[in-house]
């Protein structure tokens, strides 16, 4: 994307005022999307974003500047702006010897979306629309979305690192509205993978559409969710939003560094029962949160966060790792070249346990079974977190019975972790293609888990 | 003609016979400073620019954008939008705005002095804010981050259907996030101040807000579940209004996604509730002379004394509904085509202060923070369930703090349950104003 000599001169400019560390991040992103709504292709959108960000670190201070001008003049102007935070340099030029790093891509796409006829993308949407509308007379509206992106990045820094990456992602989702005597209800189902258009070789868009429609239609008969503390069984796959919020964000080293996490100082301690082993793994090919290198040039890793109930490690980016005198765990990510990297999750999942998932429900006299979750949110400093259920049922006398209307659940991370009393053997990754937001930046994350039970968590419905 | 308008106009002029072409061009520069523990943690500065091009031909629409104003990139973007239009479904209502004779208000959202503000002065403001929060109460354990940010944005939109407008705005803010606690307990609170120029920023107010919000939650417990009256603090009402704004979009109505469809003229809220979107109000954070399609913004009454009056429309939704655009086209920068939305949504304030409302409510809950609005509020079904923190109201005054609770109802029910609107209207960041409101009954989920 850039000549090595240009990179060296830009890094030299960035360090001229005395910075301890300098980095250039170059990004070229192409994306396309198509939106089908109300029985029509609303429009196709194509996008191109290309630019670079230069970071200069001096002591505990970071300077950052970004530009869409990738000429040497533009990049050196950004380097000068970023280096404004350092004022101790002698103005001399340091030459950084760059060593190209190679990291194995988690997955090699076989069909780049830019090579696919736009008609084929539109046809997928029309098929999904048809399938959702055929799911029942109550289906009153359908929208379907297709999106792909190709993100090529280059990272070089004053430690001599030079690494490049090329990541292709594809997603597809269907939203349905159903109308009945009780008003309107909604359903969503989607898939997102770090793959090219070949994703559709084994993704059935009609099945996705039907699941979305069934979810909306079933909720027409739903009663208000209960209000208060109840046992909750969370189904395999998407239920992992629970771990993402209950402890994932709290294990990010930037929250730890500022003592803004309830898990500060707890490495080596028991934080959950022995049936809980939690992993964050950026190397999982095809999964939505996978990549070869993070946005600081560090290869993705498989990191065990909780091992049989014991907190083993946090997740790290380059700056936090440097301060702690260790290596980054490959979790330094950014939304785009407009942003500074920070510690982020990749694919976070709970390993399978040994119990029969059906048994977890059978052993629960009264509670809630959550089949599908929307998003969530956490305050890492207090540990309180919410997650929203978008398909849920009442459990009565050990059986799944009536569907429930949407509601949030609220709990406290460390308490909920220690209240997980059973983990089943039906591990599944969530297919949804989730987006995680943190301090204004959004990145794709994956997640997975087997069915599990929490002895008590507050369900935020309106029924007594 | 400004440079950006000139560029937008040139792109629109490239329209071929039978084509309608719209170019939206934007350029901005921004600064963001984060301080921590008496020093600069990060200082980011940037300029950015981009173009979004919409082409309508044979009643089909295509869109493309690029984060560059380079001539060749802009030309490629126009070609890509043109190509994309070939794959859209034909819809006779598609088309670009054309001038409708409404005269734009004369509001100046640009403060040139912001561009001259030295970086050192910006850093000082963030440091000063951090210092004041730390000094505000001995129970403040740490300030997680204290920020100063500003942006100066210019944009232009031109079409070959007669639209050619440009506008610019400056904005700046300070914000702070504090952690309070002794022993094992931690509570958090945030404060901020926003304005168009540095003179508008009130550092004391931001500091006091963060200190009060974090410290008054200390000792919070999880109460038993109950149904009770709920008072929403100003910021929470802003959140509620943002949810409501989606249900009042004419596009949502046309597509069968609004719980207010077919209800114009009906009593959807209590008689004391009047809701207006008025971007021509210069006090509103989202004030604007033009909407995103280049029509002059205007005042739109949505709910009058509880009666549903009207929905909001952009050009497409208006044509489809057989009404004029209400100049409610909004877009998230140059990367998306215009949708429909509010800019300055506000309840008509009442006469009572928050204190008087608390006294009137007697027993209940004051909510100062909500979470999970994206995961627990369904604007189509109306189900409303969010995580909350706040203080119990006892004998008409604030009492013990509570946390790890949910509050739930439905949007439909809440509008009919509003028993008081405060006199403390404030324009907060975003598209809606804050004001204290009291709701007769909600479900509080707790222990």
Image: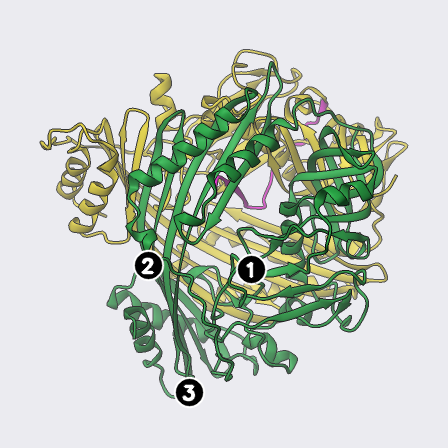
Residue A64 in the image, given as x and y percentages of width and height: 30, 39
Q: Which chain does the residue under circle 3 lie in?
A: B
Q: Could you tell me if residue A107 is visible in this image?
A: no
Magenta segment, which residues? A420-442
Residue B77 in the image, given as x and y percentages of width and height: 34, 68
Q: Could you tell me if residue A110 is visible in this image?
A: yes
Q: CA distance from mark 3 to mark 2?
A: 29 Å
- Tell which tag, 1 or 2, sits nearer the viewer: 2
Colour chain A appears in: yellow
Give the residue drawn at x 60%, y 31%. Answer: B212
Please tell me whether mark 2 sits on a helix, a strand or a loop. Answer: strand
Q: Is residue B165 above or below residue B390?
A: below
Q: CA distance from mark 1 to mark 3?
A: 28 Å
Give the residue drawn at x 51%, y 63%. Answer: B282
Q: Quadrant of the N terminus of chain B?
A: bottom left
| Residue B18 numbered mark, or none | 3
Within 10 Å of disc 2 (Cα), the crowding (few <14, some 14-19, many 20+) is many
Q: Earlier in the sequence, mark 3 or mark 2?
A: 3
Q: Is residue A181 left or right of residue A212?
A: right
Residue B205 in the image, given as x and y percentages of width and height: 53, 39
| Residue A375 numbered mark, or none | none
Residue at numbered disc 2: B49
Q: Which chain does the residue under circle 2 lie in?
A: B
Colour chain B appears in: green
Badges 1 and 2: C-beta atoms under 8 Å apart? no
**Observer-nearest of B132 and A297:** B132
Q: Residue placed farthest to the right in the image?
A: A397
Residue at numbered disc 1: A145
Give the residue drawn at x 70%, y 34%. Answer: B390
């Amino acid at each position: 994307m850039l000549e090595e000599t240009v990179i060296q001169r830009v890094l030299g400019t960035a360090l001229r005022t005395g910075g301890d560390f300098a980095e250039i991040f170059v990004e070229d992103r192409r994306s396309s999307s198509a939106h089908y709504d109300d029985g029509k292709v609303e429009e196709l959108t194509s996008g191109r974003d290309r630019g670079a960000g230069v970071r200069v670190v001096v002591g505990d201070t970071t300077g950052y500047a970004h530009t869409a001008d990738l000429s040497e003049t533009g990049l050196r102007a950004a380097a000068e702006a970023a280096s404004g935070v350092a004022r101790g340099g002698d103005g001399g030029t340091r030459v950084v010897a760059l060593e190209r790093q190679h990291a194995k891509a988690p997955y090699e796409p076989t069909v780049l979306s830019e090579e696919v006829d736009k008609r084929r993308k539109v046809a997928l949407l029309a098929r999904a629309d048809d399938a959702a509308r055929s799911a029942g007379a109550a289906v009153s509206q359908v929208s379907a979305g297709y999106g792909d992106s190709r993100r090529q990045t280059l990272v070089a820094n004053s430690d001599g690192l030079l690494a490049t990456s090329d990541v292709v992602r594809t997603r597809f989702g269907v939203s349905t509205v159903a109308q009945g005597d009780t008003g309107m209800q909604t359903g969503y189902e989607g898939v997102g993978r770090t793959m090219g258009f070949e994703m559709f070789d084994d993704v059935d868009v009609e099945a996705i559409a039907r699941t979305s429609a069934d979810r909306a239609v079933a909720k027409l008969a739903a009663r208000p969710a209960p209000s208060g503390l109840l046992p909750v069984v969370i189904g395999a796959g998407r239920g992992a939003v629970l771990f993402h919020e209950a402890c994932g964000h709290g294990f990010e080293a930037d929250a730890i560094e500022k003592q803004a996490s309830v898990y500060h100082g707890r490495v080596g301690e028991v934080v959950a029962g022995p049936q809980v082993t939690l992993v964050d793994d950026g190397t999982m090919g095809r999964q939505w949160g996978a990549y070869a290198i993070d946005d600081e040039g560090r290869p993705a890793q498989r990191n065990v966060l909780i091992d049989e109930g014991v907190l083993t490690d946090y997740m790290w980016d380059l700056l936090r790792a440097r301060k702690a005198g260790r290596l980054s765990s490959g979790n330094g990510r950014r939304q785009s070249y407009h942003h500074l990297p920070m510690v982020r999750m990749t694919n976070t999942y709970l390993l399978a346990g040994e119990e029969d998932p059906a048994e977890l429900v059978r052993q629960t006299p009264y509670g809630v079974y959550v089949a599908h979750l929307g998003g969530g949110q956490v305050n890492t400093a207090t540990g309180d977190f919410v997650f929203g259920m978008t398909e849920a049922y009442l459990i009565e006398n050990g059986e799944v019975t009536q569907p429930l209307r949407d509601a949030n659940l609220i709990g406290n991370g460390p308490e909920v972790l220690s209240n997980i009393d059973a983990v089943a053997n039906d591990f599944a990754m969530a297919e949804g293609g989730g987006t995680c937001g943190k301090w204004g930046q959004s990145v794709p994350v994956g997640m997975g888990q087997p069915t599990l039970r929490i002895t008590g968590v507050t369900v935020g419905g309106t029924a007594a | 003609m400004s440079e950006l308008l000139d560029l937008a106009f040139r792109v629109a002029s490239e329209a071929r016979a039978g084509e309608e072409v719209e170019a939206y061009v934007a350029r901005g520069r921004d600064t963001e400073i984060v301080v921590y523990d008496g020093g600069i943690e990060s200082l980011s500065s940037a300029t950015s620019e981009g173009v979004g091009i919409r082409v309508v031909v044979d009643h089909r629409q295509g869109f493309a954008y690029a984060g560059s104003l380079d001539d060749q990139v802009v030309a490629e973007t126009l070609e890509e939008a043109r190509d994309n239009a070939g794959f859209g479904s034909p819809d006779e209502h598609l088309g670009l705005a054309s001038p409708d004779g409404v005269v734009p208000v004369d509001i100046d959202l640009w403060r040139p002095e912001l561009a001259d503000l030295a970086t050192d002065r910006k850093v000082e403001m963030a440091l000063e804010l951090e210092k004041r929060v730390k000094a505000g109460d001995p129970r403040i354990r740490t300030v997680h981050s204290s920020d100063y940010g500003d942006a100066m944005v210019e944009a232009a939109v031109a079409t070959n259907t007669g639209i050619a407008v440009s506008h610019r705005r400056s904005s700046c803010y300070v914000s702070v996030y504090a952690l309070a606690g002794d022993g094992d307990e931690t509570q958090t609170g945030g404060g901020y101040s926003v304005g168009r120029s540095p003179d508008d920023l009130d550092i004391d107010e931001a500091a006091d807000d963060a200190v009060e919000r974090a410290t008054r939650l200390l000792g919070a417990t999880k109460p038993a579940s109950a149904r009770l009256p709920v008072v929403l603090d100003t910021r929470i009402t802003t959140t509620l209004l943002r949810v409501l704004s989606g249900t009042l979009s004419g596009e949502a109505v046309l597509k069968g996604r609004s719980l207010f469809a077919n209800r114009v003229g009906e009593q959807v809220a209590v008689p004391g509730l009047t809701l207006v979107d008025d971007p021509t109000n210069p006090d509103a954070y989202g004030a604007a002379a033009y909407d995103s399609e280049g029509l002059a913004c205007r005042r739109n009454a949505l709910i009058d004394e509880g009666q549903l009056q009207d929905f909001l429309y952009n050009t497409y939704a208006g044509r489809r509904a057989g009404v004029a655009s209400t100049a409610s086209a909004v877009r998230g920068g140059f990367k998306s085509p215009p949708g429909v939305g509010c800019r300055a949504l506000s309840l008509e304030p009442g006469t009572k202060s928050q204190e008087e409302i608390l006294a009137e409510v007697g027993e209940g809950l004051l909510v100062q923070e909500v979470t999970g609005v994206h995961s627990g509020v369904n604007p189509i079904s109306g189900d409303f369930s969010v995580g909350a923190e706040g203080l119990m109201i006892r004998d008409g005054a604030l009492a013990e703090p509570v946390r790890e609770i949910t509050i739930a109802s439905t949007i439909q029910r809440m509008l009919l349950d509003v028993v008081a609107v405060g006199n403390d209207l404030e324009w907060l960041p975003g598209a809606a104003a804050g004001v204290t409101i009291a709701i007769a009954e909600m479900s509080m989920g707790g222990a």
